């Protein structure tokens, strides 16, 4: 896996602060985050995990839902498939 760095204004949600810095990634893992004195226009945020979602309510197949969700910062979902049973019941009756 490739090693790289990314720099920007880092949003630290745990400590409720934003600071300029560089993230060093080695073999796909963050090795360290270094605060620096750079002036950056972009922000680096942690990904959003949607804790409760009904994919079938979106009327999209899961792959299309995932493509659209990642554009908005979601990196994972906890999907509740209970509505699938309701849809199947309508189809079978």
Image (cartoon, rainbow, N blue to C red):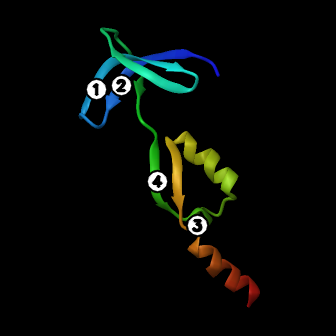
Q: Residue at x 62, y 66 (%)?
A: 56
Residue 18's label in the rendered image is 1
Q: Is residue 89 above or below residue 27?
A: below
Image spot of residue 41 (x, y percent): 39, 18
Position of 7 with respect to 91 (left or right) is left
Disc number for residue 88: none
Label 2 crowd (10 A; few <14 / some 14-19 / many >=20): many
The residue singled out by tag 3 in the image is 57
Q: Earlier in the sequence, mark 3 or mark 4?
A: 4
Return the residue nearer the eye: 52 or 41. 52
Dot 1 or dot 2: first in sequence order is 2
The mark nearer the N terminus, 4 or 1, is 1
How far is the residue under mark 2 from the one under mark 3? 34 Å
Q: Which residue is mark 4?
A: 50
For mark 2, give the secondary structure.
strand
User: Cα distance, mark 3 to mark 4?
Assistant: 15 Å
Q: Nearer the viewer, mark 2 or mark 3?
A: 2
Residue at the spot 42% in from the left edge and 27% down from the top edge: 44
**Residue 45 occupies which quadrant of the picture?**
top left
């Amino acid at each position: 896996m490739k090693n790289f760095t990314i720099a920007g204004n880092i949003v630290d949600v745990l400590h409720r602060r934003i600071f300029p810095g560089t993230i060093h990634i080695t073999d796909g893992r963050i090795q360290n985050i270094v605060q620096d004195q750079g002036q950056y226009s972009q922000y680096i945020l942690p990904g959003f995990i949607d804790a409760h979602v009904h994919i079938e309510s979106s009327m999209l197949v899961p792959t299309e839902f995932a493509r659209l969700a990642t554009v908005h910062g979601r990196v994972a979902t906890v999907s509740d498939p209970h509505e699938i049973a309701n849809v199947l019941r309508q189809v079978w009756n």
